[in-house]
Amino acid sequence: MNKKNTEYLINRKDNQYEVVIGLEVHAQVLSESKLFSSSSTKFGAEPNTQVSLVDAAFPGMLPVINEFCIKQAIKTGIGLNAKINKRSVFDRKNYFYADLPQGYQISQFKDPIVGEGKVILDMPNGQKEVGIERLHLEQDAGKSIHDLDPQNTFVDLNRSGVALMEIVSKPDLRSPDEVNAYIKKLRSIMRYLGTCDGNMQEGSLRADVNVSVRPKGSKEFGTRCEIKNVNSIKFMQMAIEYEANRQVDLIEEGKTIDQETRLFDTKKNETRSMRSKEDAHDYRYFPDPDLLPLEVSEKFIKELKNDIPELPDDKKKRFIEEFELSPYDANILVSDIDTSKYFEEVVAKMGKNKDIKLAVNWITGELFAVLNSKGLEISQSPVSAKNFAILINLIKNGTISGKIAKTVFELMIDGDKDPQKIVEEKGLKQQSDPKALEVLIDKIINENREKAIEYKQGKEKLFGFFVGQAMKASGGKANPQLINEILKKKL
Amino acid sequence: MSDITKQSLTELVENIKNKKLSSTDVTKAFIQRSEKSSELNAYITDDFTSALDKAKKFDQKPNLDLKLPGIPMAVKDLFCTKNVKTTAGSKILNNFVPTYESTVTENIWHEGAILLGKLNCDEFAMGSSNETSHFGNVQNPIDKNLVPGGSSGGSASAVAGQLTPITIGTDTGGSIRQPASFTGIVGLKPTYGSCSRYGIVAFASSLDQAGPMAQNVKDCALLQEVISTYDSKDSTSINFKRNHYSKELTKNIKGKKIGIPKEYRVDGMPKEIEDLWQKGIQYAKDCGAETIDISLPHTSYALPTYYIVAPAEASSNLARYDGVKYGYRAKGENLIDMYEKTRSEGFGAEVQRRIMIGTYVLSSGYYDAYYLKAQKVRKLIKNDFDEAYKRVDAILTPSTPSSAFKIGEKTNDPVSMYLNDIFTVPVNLAGLPGISIPAGHDTKGYPLGLQIIGKAFDEQNILNIAFAMEEKINFKNKITDWWIK
C-alpha cells in the first residue's frame, strides 16, 4: 500500500489498483416527531414507549406527512448545493421483517425530494469535489433484539417511523481518508443547518458503503460490493481497506467478484457475504396510495433558502478574508459549528486591539487539549468565550507572559473564573517596570561576576543563564523581552 | 312494535324527535328482529347489550338536535370500532379489538347513533357475494340460498331484512352498489376523498370509499351528510364544500342532461338488464331530464385495470398481517416459517389469490407491463368521464350485469365472479360518486338496480336524480321474512 503518495493505491506484484467508493449515508432528521406520525423521536427511551398506532401499523391507520421533516430535507438539499424537486413521490418498499410493522418502508424511489448536488472536501493536497446523486426521505424501521432471550426475538418500535435522509453520493471517493473527510463534511453541513445531529453513537448517522476496485488508469468500474450499515468512520475506513484488498486478491487470483451485499464484522475486522445479487430482495416499489405526491412551491423553497445560515465553505472563506487566517486554521475552526461560534465570540469580546492569530493558537492548542482530556464538546467548554478573550488580551498587552497564561488558564477551568482576577489575586502580573528589573539584574550580575566576565570574553551561551536567573528571581513574572534588553545593555 | 323495523331512517328520526318513540323502543325492536334473523348470518359480532344500555342512557337525557338521535345502527365489520372486535371478515383478525374508532363511525356516533354490531362482509372486502368471509355466507333476504352480493353483503342483507334501519359499507369496485342492487336497497359510493379512510381496514387505498346503504334515497342522503367530513388524519381526504345533502334534496331535475354510455351494452348481457336500462331512461325523461348518448371508449379495459391496481395495493396493504403484532399467529420454526403458516392459515383462498396477483404485477420485470400500464389506462378511463361530463350532468347505467345468483354458483369461477363489477369498477377507478337505486325485478322476482354516476363532488346532483326517479319507479321490495324463526 502506498500512503505517502496522495493517491491511495493497492499494489500487487506489477499491478496497481484504484479503489472506487460511493456512500449511501442515512442521516436521522433532527425533528421532535416522526416522519408520518406525532410520536416522539427522543433517543434512549424505554422500549416501545414512543410508538403510535400508525408506527405499529394497526389496521386502518394512515400516514400523514410531517411538514417539518420536509423542510429539514429541503434545507439539507440546499446545503448540499443540490436541486430541490418541486414534486416528489413517496413509494412503498415492500419486504417482510419483524421490526417492519407495515410490511413496507415508506421511502422515495423514482422521484426523490432532492436531486443532484455536490460537496467540497479539503484534502491535504487540495480541494476535492464529491457529487451527490440524490437525497430522499424514508422511514426508519424498528429494532430487533436477539440477545435478550435464547428463544425469542424482542422488537422495539421506538425508531419505527423516524425520519431518515438517505444521501447517496456518486462513486467519486477514492480512499478511506476521503471517506473520512466526506462524512465529516456532511455532518458539519447538517449540524450547521440543524437538520441532523450527526451523532454516530446513537445511530443518527450511518452508511452503506459501496466499494469496487479497478486497475489504475482504467475508466470502467469494477463489480461493486455493498457493505451494509456501518456506524463509525473508523469502521468505514477499516471495512473499505479490507474489502478493497479482498477484491484485489480475487482479481490477482484470476477470480471474479460477485456483486453482493456484505456485512462488516467489527471484531474480526473483515467483511462477510450477507446475500448475493440473485438473493436480492425484490422490493416491489410502487407509489404509496395513502399519500399524494408531495408538491412544494418556489415560495416555500425560497423561504427556506432565506433561513439557511452561513455554511462551512462560506464561513471558511470569510474567516480567511476577514481575520487573515491561514486556510488550515480556518478549516479547523469552521468544521464544527460550535467551534466557529466560540471563535467568533472570542474575537468579538477581544475588542479593538486583538491578536486573532494568538487566539486561534490558544483555541486549537490549550482549549482543545482541555476539552479532549475531559471528553467535552466545545459547547460545554469550562471556559467561556468572554473569559477566554480576556486571557488572550492579558497576554497580548503584556500583563502576563505566555507561560504564566498557561497557569492562569488552568485556574480558570475550575468554575470559569475571570483571568484578570486570578492574575490580581495570585500576583501573577508581569514585571514590566524597567527600573525595578534593572535593580534585579544588577544584583544578579554582581553575584555572578566571573560568569559575566566569561560572557564578555565570548562565551555567549551564558546569556541564557542570566535570563534564567532573572526570571527565577522574579518568580517567573518578569517580562522576558525587557530582561533581554536590559541584560544586553548591562553585560 | 313489529312495525318499528319497517320504518325508514327518516321516519324513525321523526318519531324519536316527536317523542312518539324512544331510542330504547327502536333499539329493542331492531335487536329483537336481529336475534330472530340469525339464519341470514348478517352479523359477525353483535353489541346488543351495550346498545340497549346506550339507548336507555340516551332516553334519560335525549339530545333531539342530533341528526341521528338514538338511532341504532349496525356497520360493516371493516370499520374499526373502539373496544368492539373488528375482523374484516378474516380469520387473521378474528381476535382483534381496536383501541380506536374510525372517523366515519365516530361521525355517526357523534350525531347520536348507537352501535348494534358489526356486519359480515367478504374477507378484507374481496369478493362480490360475501362468500369469502371467514364467518360464513350471508343469506339474501330476497330468497333462501341467494347471495346478497359483496363485499358489503352483511350490510345489504341487514338493511333489506330490516335488521338495521341503515348502515355503512365500503366500496372499492362496487362493494356498496352491487349488494344494494342484489337486495333491492339504495347504496351510495361517494367521491374518492369525501369520506375519511382513517380507521377503515384497507383493501386498495386508492379506490376504497365508505358510503351509506339505506332503504331509500332520503335516508341515504342524511347518512352521507353525517359521514362525509374532511379529515386531516387521511392525506387523501379532500377539503371541499359539502352540501347538506338531505336538506338540499329535491326532485326537481328538469333539464338535467343524463348520458347513456353505449359501451355499457356488454356482450351476453341478459335482456332483462337491457330492458331495465331502457325503462330507467324513460323514468329519467319522465322526471324532466334529457338523455344523451355518450361514449366512454375505454370501458372494456376497466375490469382488467382494476384487477391489477386493486390487488397490487392489497398485496402491500395486507403485509402488516404477519402474526407479529396483533391478530392470528401460527407457530413456526423460525420467523419465515411463522409468516408462511400465519398467512396461509389466516387468509382465505380469494385473499391469497389477490395477494399473489398483486405481488406478481408489482414484481421487478413485470411492473411496467402491468402496474404502470394499468395506471396509464386508469388515467384514460378518468379522461373518458371528464370528456363526457363536458356534455352531461350525470350518467345512467345498470348497476350489475345480472341479478343475484345462488350461493356456490360462481365460487369456482373467479372471472365470472369478477364480471359482476363490470359497471361499478370504472367509477372507482375514476374516483367518482355513484349511486345504485332499486329499479325493478327480473323474471325470478329478484331486484335489479340502476346506477347513476356523477361528477366528482357532485353527490347532491346524483342524489337528486335518484330521489326523483325513485318516486317514478315506486319500487317495492318483495321480502317474505322466510328466515324469521
Image (tube, coloured by chain):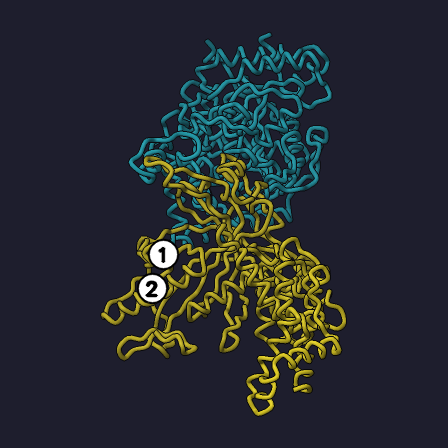
Q: Nearer the viewer, residue B75 or A77?
A: A77
- Where does label 2 land, which residue? A242
Chain A, chosen colour in render: yellow
Q: Which mark is residue B274?
A: none
Residue B279 in view in this figure:
no
Q: Secondary structure at mark 2?
A: helix
Q: Secondary structure at mark 1?
A: strand
Q: Nearer the viewer, residue B260 or A358?
A: A358
Quadrant for the N terminus of chain B in the image = top right
Three-letter code for the amino acid on which mark 1 is drawn: Phe
Q: Nearer the viewer, residue B468 or A140?
A: A140
Q: Is residue B162 above or below residue B439?
A: above
**Subunit of label 1:** A
Quarter assignment of residue A242: bottom left
Three-letter code for the amino acid on which mark 2 is drawn: Tyr
Q: Is residue A231 above or below residue B20?
A: below
Q: Residues within 10 Å of mark 2 (few under 14, many from 20)?
A: some
Find residue B431 and report its horizontal and vertical position in percent: 57, 43
Residue B372 in view in this figure:
yes
| Whether marks 1 and 2 lie on the same chain | yes
- Where does label 1 land, which residue? A264
Drawn side of residue B337 relative to residue B65, left or right: left
Quarter assignment of residue A5: bottom left
Earlier sequence position, callout 1 versus callout 2:
2
Are dots 1 and 2 in contact, CB under 8 Å? Answer: yes
Q: Is residue B50 above or below residue A42?
A: above
* Chain letter for the cyan part: B
